[in-house]
Amino acid sequence: MAFGIVRLYSSSEPQKLIEETNDHLDKNNRNNAYIGRSITRPNIFLLASRYENLQEKEDQDNENRTQDLMSKIGKGEFRDVSLIRVVNSNSDGKGLYSNSYLSLFGGENSNIKKTTELSEKIISIDGQSFLDKGISMFQTVLITGIPMNRTFIWHGINNYETANKFINEGLEAFHSDQAKKIIPEVLPLWTTKNRGIFKTIRNMS
């Protein structure tokens, strides 16, 4: 089963990070990486990678080291690094394949099992209508991380118009009445709530 690594990175040289990372990924024929740039803090990046197995991860880690990727991207620091897996999705694992923007919501959670069950219900109700509107959505849980009791809901938005509506009107503008009845039950399960919106620099493929 595939897994992912999500890195929240603060860069002192954002343009260098973008150019060098894209160049490195292209040279190594990588299509398993996503790069998003915060729309409010342009030095903050979401760097996500998908791996089919540990061997693929180790091979790519070795390429990164031998080609000295970290020194090429300039100064910066990792704010958070987590190993994750997808537990619910409306896009068959392709939620980061064709986005213009990404919304990431979540944080520490008091009952991840119940949250996952309720999120599955919401996606089963609204998943197709979201896709029809150009929005992929999926939930991730942590395999490693500090703290571990965190879960996140991702929304990949495929165009500017939909992203603008998302920002101005919120998710309620897209959810059905049936799903809206479940949302008040699931939201309080998050004991901390965080949201970031990122402009996509690079999609997976």
Image (cartoon, rainbow, N blue to C red):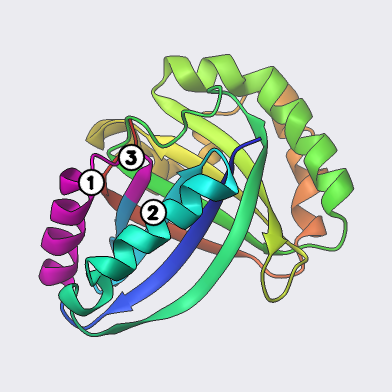
The prevailing secondary structure element of the residues shown in magenta is helix
Residue at 46 percent across and 79 percent down: it is 79
Magenta stretch encompasses residue 33: yes
Q: Identify the residue position indicated by label 1 in the image.
A: 28
Does the residue at mark 1 contact the one at mark 3 (Cβ under 8 Å)? no
Question: Comparing marks 1 and 3, which lies closer to the viewer?
Answer: 1
| Residue 173 at x, y percent in the picture | 50, 32
Q: Position of residue 13 (x, y in %)?
A: 15, 78
Choose the circle earlier in sequence order: 2 or 1.
1
Crowd rating for badge 1 (residues with CA inside 10 Å; few <14, some 14–19, many 20+): few
Instruction: Name the residue type under label 2.
Output: Gln
Q: Which mark is residue 60?
A: 2
The residue under label 3 is 163
Whether residue 177 appears in this view of the structure is no
Q: Is residue 112 left or right of residue 162?
A: right
Q: Where is the N terminus found, in terms of image quarters?
A: top right
- The quadrant the C terminus occupies is top left
Confirm whether residue 150 shows in the render.
yes
Kind of residue indicated by mark 1: Asn
Query: Which of 12/131 is in front?
Result: 12
Please report the bounds of the magenta region as a residue range: 14-34
Q: Amino acid at mark 3?
A: Ala
The image quarter in which residue 8 lies: bottom left
Task: State which tag comes first along the sequence, 3 or 2.
Answer: 2
Q: Are marks 3 and 2 in contact (CB under 8 Å)?
A: no
Q: Secondary structure at mark 2?
A: helix
- The residue located at (53%, 16%) in the rendering is 129
SS at circle 3: helix
- Circles 2, 1 touching at the beta carbon (< 8 Å): yes
How much space separates mark 3 and mark 2, taking CA atoms?
33 Å
Q: Nearer the viewer, residue 184 or 86?
A: 86
